[in-house]
Amino acid sequence: MKRLLACLPSVLLALAPLGAHAAAAPIHLKAYRSLVNLASPQFSPDGARVAFVAIRPDFVHDRYDRTLMVVDTAGGAPTALMRGMRDLAMPRWSPDGRTLSFIARVGKRKSQVWAVAAAGGTPRELTDAPRGVEQYAWSPDGRTLAYVTPDPSPIDARDRRDHHDLFTIHDDDYQISQAPVPSHIWLLSVADGKARQLTFGPTSVLENPPPFAGSITAPVWSADGKWLVFTRQIDADDSDTDKTTIAAVNVATGAVRTITAHPTYEYTPAFAPKGDAIAYLYPHGPGPVSDMDVFVTALAGGDGRDVSADLDRDVYSEYAWLPDARGLVAVADDRVGSKIYVQPLHGAGHALALGDLNPTLVAVSAQGALAFVADSATRAPELYLLRSLKDRPVALTSLNRTFAAYDYPRSIEVTWHAPDGQPDDGILTYPDHYQPGRRYPLVVYSHGGPEAASTEHFDAGEIGPLRDVFAAHGFLVFEPNYRGSDNLGDAHEHAIYRDPGVGPDSDVISGIAMLEKQGIVDRARIAAVGHSYGGYMTTWLIAHQHFWRCAVVADGAVDWTQEYELAGDGNMAWVRDSLGGSPWNPRSAALYRSGSPITYAGQITTPTLILSGTADITVPITESFALYHALASRHVPVRFIGIPGAHHMPQDPVHRELYYRAIEDWVVAHMQPSNLTGSAAGAVARADTRRSVH
């Protein structure tokens, strides 16, 4: 009897959440208006505090407000240190821990570096760069700031006034309107405010997104303060972000030298906290269509060693040295989640035990603790702490605690094999109030990238809130990680090389067949939705199969030749190196046509919603125009929505909500049973008989 009574409290505790879960209301699109995102966690030098940026949507002014916050690692509520400054980003502690610096914009001026006392107070402007500051870093002794700013335009004000403003275009996007200029490193004396330029010439500090992975990062100081390492781009053209190398510049002399012999695809350098070891990201191979690994070399030079080769995961730009310089921690996608891996310089890496948390950002303290931002499919993002690599995570914030009151659908990982044996996985989300034995409409959402993955994050990635929104409408939601995705290892990611459509199509269609065999799918109501490369996948799928009830193509890449000729942000290099050459290379020319969905647009009969940002240079809106006219001229039901000023996703909260609302409304309207009668139902039945899936 005592044993039974002892078990009762745990039974009651287990049952209590079930009752609360059943009584909670399903989450809805407007609920996300109160979601707080967290960015840039940074430990104080003594490890006692963590600074971060809290990002809140402001629907009244249609912007995102950013607040600089600090929280004690011992516990307690975070405090707001600075708010009301536009575009606040990159918080950094001064080496003595007395000051927090950050980039922000005031009035009509370009962004500058500001500083505020760690105890609070009035901020002061540190830099006065006429063209603004892009990145920056404190020297180890706290006396100097290294910052990156663009060079002045080669065309002066008088020439512009007289219209003598012609310029040369090279590997640039189709919306370029003035000559590109390189960005260079400057050094600022914190004591007297004097600045001097450190690097010069036509090469540039990387300032635009790379083609596959890696990111724009600030220069990094050596422990002795004598050197800075940075990602150097061969020129300032925004489509040449593949032509990058890790370079070191001597702070005293300004002499620059390249560290390795790799001519391309090097990113995100990081000096070890002691010694002269330098880590950087470089493709595992074969070629750049592969996992991005951590390589470690020395300041003296050399390609170094791939220390994460055996990890077989695509390392995010979010990685950091451990304080003993014997290893690193890195975030990477793994199956339908993400993990923090500990990677020693010698030996196998391993994942930290984080439960169901999926980390996105990580920072390491000088004492060996980890701070990271994480979430899950049913848990909004918060800041967490690992006091040591062996401890369990502790939540430092509860900024999104109101989201615990909602009911969330159940998501699981599903696995299958494509007809050619390719292993695949994905996320299956069940509709709210799911009842076994019933068949439900199915929304197939293809993620972008393709070097990315569908993972169980909360309102993250391109799917945003749609997983929960569609489940609330009574739909199954299937998110396949087709070949090319970065969550199952190098072989899975590289399998998309020179196979942009046929192979991924077989992955998605065989995944649908796997679900149909479970008897849960209403085969007459299946929708295809996707963004970016997911828009490519959606267009390809509706052109090659004709059972789809409706489709949504958002910022979709449908024509590889247009991507090569018009896009920026490294997409020219992405297309060239994914398809094996340019459109004018005999080896790859045919693939530009056969691998482009626009080639088969005349076969599309599916009602399709097209969305595109008018300022998108990653996937130019011209491709959406081409798809729209291919459907409209043949009287296929189609609607084309332009998003003013958006670059490859809405950047303001109002447009973001309208974007997701348009997708929701289109799919829900077309998935109603009354929308499929007579000849349309027969068409679906005939399409089903034509599917060759296994």
Image (cartoon, grey):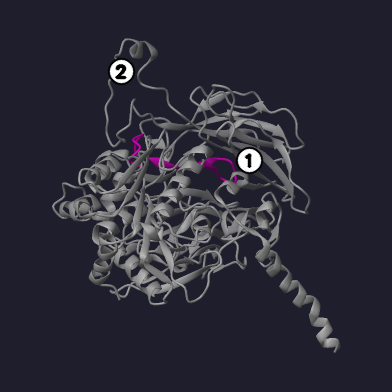
Which quadrant would the N terminus be assigned to in this image? Answer: bottom right
Q: Are marks 1 and 2 in contact (CB under 8 Å)?
A: no
Assess disc 1: are there few (<14), some (14-19) or many (≥20) residues with their C-alpha within 10 Å of its C-alpha. many
Residue farthest right in this picture: 2
Q: Name the residue under label 2.
A: 165
Q: Which x, y percent locates residue 608?
A: 32, 50
Tell how many labels.
2
Q: Is residue 408 magenta?
A: no
Q: Is residue 223 magenta?
A: yes
Q: What residue type is labelled 1?
A: Arg
Which residue is pictured at 61% across the width and 47% down the height? 35
> What residue sits 28% from the left and 50% below the top?
575
Q: Quadrant of residue 232?
A: top left
Three-letter code, disc 2: Asp
Estimate the x, y position of residue 251 in percent, counting from the top left: 52, 36
Task: Give, as a single range, the part of the protein colored magenta.
Answer: 219-241
Q: Does residue 55 lie above or below 509 as drawn?
A: above
Helix, strand or loop status at disc 2? loop
* 1 or 2: mark nearer the eye: 2
Extreme-bottom residue of the structure: 1
Q: Mark 1 points at which residue?
A: 92
Q: Earlier in the sequence, mark 1 or mark 2?
A: 1
Q: Which of 44 and 222 is in front in this view?
A: 44
